[in-house]
Amino acid sequence: MAVVGVLALQGSYNEHMAALRRIGVRGVEVRKPEQLLGVDSLIIPGGESTTMAKLANYHNMFPALREFVGGGKPVWGTCAGLIFLANKAVGIKTGGQELVGGLDCTVHRNFFGSQLQSFETELSVPKLAEKEGGNDTCRGVFIRAPAILEVGSDVEVLADCPVPANRPSITISSGDGAEEEVYSKDRVIVAVRQGNILATAFHPELTSDSRWHRYFLGMDKESHAKAFSALSLSSSSIDAEDLPKNKPLDLPIFE
């Protein structure tokens, strides 16, 4: 059975562990780099991204996390986890914030405003429903949430939502230090997938809908299938002419 790691430095890791238990999956709390060696996939939960980054630095997690993501194992970031996985983040605190990277997108750290602007809404998720069944919508819980401003060509958009009317103006500093408006669309991206990376700006672990967790587990099965296919292809490419002529091919013996 696949073992799912949950980064347990800060944030809603307990809720993800509970969500995994509800669907009969073994979850393991991850706090040290070496613990990543024992898991097949990883969830980076929501929380306070700056605090999580400081704790990840303290435990020297960033090199191991980057290696894990780059190695092709499935990784899912929710809320602050999305920020961690983005290649670029704006709206961050003075002094910057270290990122794991790997997801070709630009994310705004507090797109929807402060804690007081947290909200819930129904999201249209036809691709999730196609894979996992159920309704074409899911409940999105946004808590001081980020959002994805733009994505690369290899990134699949799984959900977006209307920009709230009370959203604060989104600005970043340009190269010369001047402030400029960078987002004026009426919808914003809140869920994406790029290869082995899944990212959601909201918190599926805070709802009873287990489809996002099942979808993520399906990514793990896909990665194992691809690895097995590559191994089979590599094995079949051995030319029989290259085998020793005077020794029969050894076969496994089952007793």
Image: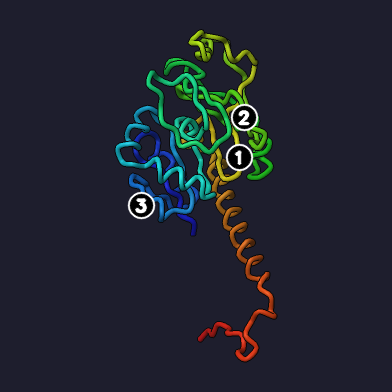
Q: Residue at coordinates 58% horizontally, 34% vertically from top-left?
A: 104
Q: Identify the amino acid type marked 3.
A: Glu
Q: Which residue is mark 3?
A: 34
Q: Which residue is mark 1?
A: 194
Q: Percent from the top left, x then y, of residue 81?
A: 46, 34
Q: Secondary structure at mark 3?
A: helix
Q: Identify the amino acid type marked 2.
A: Val
Q: Residue at coordinates 53% horizontally, 38% vertically from top-left?
A: 102
Q: Percent from the top left, x then y, of residue 216?
A: 55, 45
Left or right of residue 138, residue 34 in this image: left
Mark closer to the chain start, 2 or 1 = 2
Residue projecting furthest to the bottom:
246
Left or right of residue 11, residue 197 in this image: right
Q: Secondary structure at mark 2?
A: strand
The circle drawn on residue 222 is: none
The reply to whether residue 167 is visible in this rendering is no
Disc 2, disc 1: CB below 8 Å? yes
Judge by depth and name the residue closer to the eye, 245 or 127. 245
Q: Percent from the top left, x then y, of residue 235?
A: 63, 70
Q: Which residue is mark 2?
A: 151
